[in-house]
Image (cartoon, helix red, strand yellow):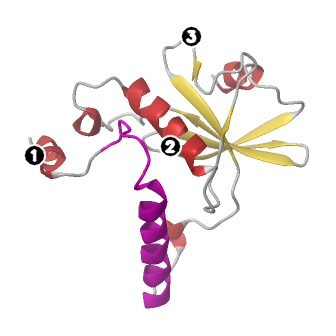
């Protein structure tokens, strides 16, 4: 599957390294000096994310996320940006029916491997506040909503 994905993008000599597989198959792609984040939007076996989407097709949320990232490029926040495939599209549909997105790479650390200190918690809170401020005037987007309705779906 990864070979099919790599052929659909304008990589010269890509080397894909699996980062993890949970709600997506997530890879780091090294292509010379350039680095990208590649996601195959297929949940790991046994994971079911229908509680997030409800009856909305997953592609709607993938498209919405790309739109959000494109809107964020016009803000002072340092965010990833979608990378188009060889057809100029932000989302690649594979023969399997799975969707693929490629994003620019941002260096950072896996918070799951970090000690959560009061300073780190404060920094994360400040970043969330900045994100909220920057996106307050954005148009409505189809996003996962972690509200009472989602909690009921999870418990069902």
Q: CA distance from mark 2 to mark 3?
A: 26 Å
Q: Which residue is mark 1?
A: 152
Structural crowding at the residue carrying mark 1, measured as other residues with C-alpha within 10 Å and reported as few (<14), some (14–19) or many (≥20): few
Structural crowding at the residue carrying mark 3, measured as other residues with C-alpha within 10 Å and reported as few (<14), some (14–19) or many (≥20): few
Taking 67 as reference, is 150 above or below it?
below
The image position of residue 118, as x and y in percent, is 43, 89
The image position of residue 32, as x and y in percent, is 91, 43
The label on residue 68 is 2
Q: Which residue is mark 3?
A: 95
Say what secondary structure mark 1 lies in. Answer: helix
The quarter of the rendered structure image containing the C terminus is top left
- For marks 2 and 3, give the one nearer the viewer: 2
What's the residue at 65%, 21% (across, down)?
Answer: 89
N-term-proximal mark, 1 vs 2: 2
Taking 132 as reference, is 104 above or below it?
above
N-term-proximal mark, 1 vs 3: 3
Magenta-highlighted residues: 118-144
Look at the image and say whether residue 80 sits in the magenta stretch: no
């Amino acid at each position: 599957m990864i070979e099919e994905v790599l052929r659909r993008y304008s990589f010269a000599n890509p080397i894909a390294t699996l980062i993890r597989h949970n709600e997506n198959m997530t890879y780091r792609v090294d292509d010379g000096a350039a680095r990208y984040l590649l996601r195959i939007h297929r949940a790991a076996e046994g994971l079911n994310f229908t509680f997030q989407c409800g009856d909305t097709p997953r592609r709607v949320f993938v498209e919405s996320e790309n739109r959000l990232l494109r809107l964020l490029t016009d803000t002072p926040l340092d965010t990833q940006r979608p990378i188009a495939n060889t057809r100029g599209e932000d989302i690649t549909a594979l023969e399997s029916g799975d969707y693929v997105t490629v994003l620019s790479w941002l260096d950072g650390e896996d918070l799951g491997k970090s000690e959560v200190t009061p300073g780190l918690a404060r920094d994360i809170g400040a970043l969330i506040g900045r994100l909220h401020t920057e996106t307050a005037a954005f148009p409505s987007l189809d996003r996962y909503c972690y509200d009472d309705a989602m909690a009921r779906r999870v418990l069902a």
